[in-house]
Amino acid sequence: MDQDFLKEVSAQLRKPSGEFGNEIAQRMNESNLRMNLDTINSLKIEDDHTVLEIGMGNGFFIKEILSKANKVKYIGCDYSEDMVALSTEMNQTFIDSGQATFHLSEAHHLPTDNSSIDHLFTINTIYFWNDIPTLLSEFKRVLKPNGTLAISLRPEGCLRQFPSTQYNFTYYNAEQVSEILKAHGFSVKQIIEVTEPEMEVMKKHLIPEFAILLAHKTSTN
């Protein structure tokens, strides 16, 4: 398989842009359907909760979040200008009603107040984090005392099956992420691990897996 093409796919997975980025985002909606839905369900969203997502792509799953309870507010942050534009276009009705806002934002500078978020979640972004202590400190800043942090990822054994992940990805498994969270002021409450049916990606037949880690700030942080 052409290495330049794989490098481009890897770059687009990290930060989608342009027409190819839009196509990649749509493909991710399809291939990560269960991962997104299971993560959203795991949050246990209730009335009046505020949910912040880091790396929302084109915003396809926001309707699922807002349908979970009454008066739910959603904040989406992405550092791809094109994804913020697509999310805004796809969810204009929710923006107009005051239920959703979107921000061009790095994850270590989130556009929200201290202790204002009930649930912060991110899917398939941890592979690209450069400064984990700073990011987790920012997550603690914005989460309410009993707020939930959910990190969803495909573990190393699964991710290595995808040809494009050999470039610019850092591999983790659920146990490693759990230890990282514990070392930076979080208590891991649950790890959900799922094996999905076989799928075909770039003419390869893969057995996809994912893990969802649910954590809270420790009482001393």
Image (cartoon, helix red, strand yellow):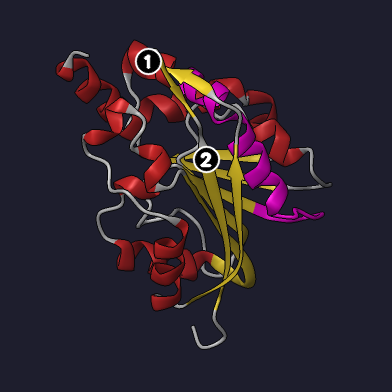
Marker disc for residue 202: 1
Name the residue rendered at 22%, 14% in the picture. Answer: 1
Is residue 1 inside the magenta stretch? no
Name the residue rendered at 56%, 50% in the picture. Answer: 52
Question: Is residue 98 visible to the viewer in this orientation of the structure?
Answer: no
Farthest left residue? Answer: 4
Q: Nearer the viewer, residue 71 or 41?
A: 41
Name the residue rendered at 57%, 67% in the picture. Answer: 215
Compared to residue 211, the image places residue 101 above or below, namely above
**How far is the residue under mark 1 from the one under mark 2?**
17 Å
Q: Main secondary structure of the magenta part?
A: helix
Name the residue rendered at 36%, 61% in the picture. Answer: 135
Is residue 49 inside the magenta stretch? yes
Q: Which residue is mark 2?
A: 209
Relative image position of residue 19 (x, y in whole percent)? 35, 11
Magenta residues, start to end: 25-50
Compared to residue 106, the image places residue 85 above or below, namely above
Relative image position of residue 145 (x, y in whole percent)? 62, 76
